[in-house]
Amino acid sequence: MSEFPLSQSPEEYLETGQQEHRTLALLLTAAELRYSNLERALALANEAEERARADHDHNHVSRALMIKGEVQMDFRDYDEALSCYNQALKLARLTGHRIMQSRILNGIGAIHYNLGSYPQTIAVWERSLGIKEELGERESQATTLQNLGIVYTTLGQHEQALEYYNRSLAINIEFGNQRGVSRAYHNIATYYLDTNQPNSAIEFLNRSLQIKEQIGDQQGMATTYNNLGNANFLLKNYDNALHYYQKSLAIKQEQGDKMGVASTQGAIGKVYAKQGDIEAAKQMFQAHLDVAHQLGQQLQIAIAFESLGTLHARQDDVDAAITYLAEAADTARQIGAKTYLHSILQNLIDVLLQTERRNQATPFLIEFVALQKEVFNTESDRRLKNMQALYEVEQARKESEILRLSNQHLEQEAEFRKKELTTTALYLTQKNEMLRKLRRYVADLREFISAKGEKALRHVEQAVSEAIGSEEYWSGFERQFQQVHVGYLETLSARYPGLTPTELKVCSLIKINLSTKEIAQILNAESRSIEKYRQRIRKKLNLGKDDNLSTFLAGIGGVE
């Protein structure tokens, strides 16, 4: 935005009532007040838009609409914000104002990110980045590169995210932007934490911390101290972890960040528990719980209850453990945190089954089994949505010619999909193994309860057995398999019509390189049964003794 032409500040100019530069003064003041007084910022932007339209000044109308979009985004009115941004972008294109276009695209991308529309986020920010590259605006590219890295981190594409973080780091170093360098170091450290490389994470966190200490970024220092605590906790360096958590806690207390204080107290409690200082751990967990109650943070309340329950379970204080875990489950249930509830129930069931109160595990087992299916479906949907998002991103890149898809990239995309498919298959094996363990628990319980309770447990056992052999889980896997290996099963079935549906299932699992044991777990069969299926399949495919079944199946066509 251009410099205000008079000696007084824009806000002082507005108070004088002068009209000559009033529109620009309104825009400058609105942009400044966006960080402290949203209502007034919006009112000034509206007045600026009205005046600019009367003057047919498209540049100032575009600026006013952009500020309105920013304010509406802060109000979380994303529909209105997007409308303002789109109008601003249209005018910026009309006037050929490329820098303005880039800034507006940044805002549009932020809206899509907040809405979880990651393909649109990446496409829009890539367009913004392209404009900056075209104009040689290297310094401003760094922030957009960081933001793109964050989106890819959200999608679980850590290597792609690291590439963007490193590009941003290089630019920030080139221009001496210490705050940007610190942020890049911190994001790179996050990559190493996400990929379970805590030693490398510590190296970059310390680099980030050194800069934050130099520039006096207290809030940033607290976050970095916290992550240094997390990294050391992963390495089981509990004294170091405690040191960094306490430094983070001191800053948060000074800043009056109550929930931040409580969360860090929870982390400190876990360190004390690992060090065997049970009373200190209890105090930290209780402090976490008290603040969470005070602030009405239900998820934090559930986390604190679970921490207390787990701690009492370690002390063999079973009654207290069950009480706290039941409270955690009830809180998670109230806020609909189903995945977290699923985890809490598993802990609660394990505690109950080790006591004389085994029969009390029945209702929790029933709920756990019901949640198992829902959690699995939610996780599968998330993975498929992420795959679809990445596919849409690449399609958008191709269509806009920002990045052309090469043969190498297509191979990488196919490889990514194959890895996701294998991950889903292995998740199925874990799911069935856990359900079989539950079924054994239920069978053991039947010796200790009444006839009425035994009837309820038989229903649980039946539900577990049905879940293990559920065709619904297989159908989800089969849909994903067909997306990765398009037309494969149809081709195989057409060439070898003698293959039964079960044999086709075995072929598809061999195709993705699963072992006999893993195939048996997915299909709820014995390993020797799978070996017999393999022999029948070899016979129907007319394979000789020296022919490798996996290699043969891998070579069958279909559109991949």
Image (cartoon, rainbow, N blue to C red):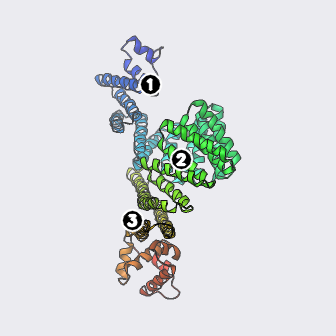
> Helix, strand or loop at disc 1?
helix
Q: Residue at x 48, y 40 (%)?
A: 297
Residue type (three-letter) at the residue carrying disc 1: Leu
Residue underneath mark 1? 33
Residue underneath mark 3? 476
Residue underneath mark 2? 305
Residue 522 appears left or right of 244: left
CB contact under 8 Å: marks 3 and 1 = no
* Circle 1 or circle 2, nearest the eye: 2
> Helix, strand or loop at disc 2?
helix
The percent position of residue 59, horizontal first and vertical second, equals: 36, 28
> Helix, strand or loop at disc 3?
helix
Residue 295 appears left or right of 19: right
The percent position of residue 70, horizontal first and vertical second, equals: 41, 33
Q: Residue furthest left?
A: 54
Q: Which residue lies furthest to the front in this view?
A: 450
